[in-house]
Image (cartoon, helix red, strand yellow):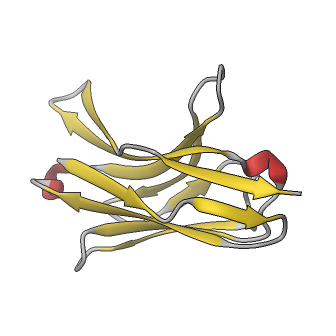
Amino acid sequence: VQLVESGGGLVQAGGSLRLSCAASGTTSSINAWGWYRQAPGKQRELVAGIASGDGSTNYADSVKGRFTISRDNAKNTMYLQMNSLEPEDKDVYYCHAGELQGRIRVVHYWGQGAQVTVSS
């Protein structure tokens, strides 16, 4: 599975951006999709996730009500709509796909990362 991100950039506080993640390869085996972000010197953290099966979503508390994750199965593309952006949202955002192989082994696929910068 290959993931290619697009849509990062610079925006003023209060503004919006939409990230896209185009997937290719055997995506039918993917169980869960998500967006992570990482600041320099910090651990990568989950921003939002969406399940392949029922499409259920989950969000980090810091982005609830502002960010929306979605997936267009026909286009094999995942999105992260980010509204009301704050300077604290400035990070590199990574697209992620997880594949459960067997009972306990999870294979992780990552996009190349997209820089999001929010000016105050």
Q: Position of residue 84 (x, y in %)?
A: 79, 69
Q: Is residue 13 left or right of residue 77?
A: right
Q: Residue at x 39, y 66 (%)?
A: 78
- The residue closer to the viewer here, 80 or 9, is 9
**Residue under the image location 15 percent in, 30 percent down:** 102
Residue 107, by quadrant, is: top left
Question: In this view, which residue lies farthest toward the bottom?
Answer: 74
Give the side of residue 20 with respect to residue 47, left or right. Answer: left
Tell me which residue sits at (76%, 56%) in the image: 118
Q: Percent from the top left, x then y, of residue 98?
A: 31, 41
The answer to whether any part of residue 7 appears in the image is yes
How many circles with numbers are drawn on the protein? 0
Can residue 61 be seen here? The reply is no
In the picture as drawn, the residue positioned furthest to the right comes out as 120
**Closest to the observer: 53 or 80?**
80
Looking at the image, the residue that sits furthest to the top is 41
Q: Residue at x 59, y 60 (%)?
A: 9
Tell me the quarter of the image containing the C terminus. Answer: bottom right
Question: Residue 113 at what x, y percent from top left?
Answer: 45, 45
- Tell me if residue 19 comes above or below residue 25 in the rendering: below
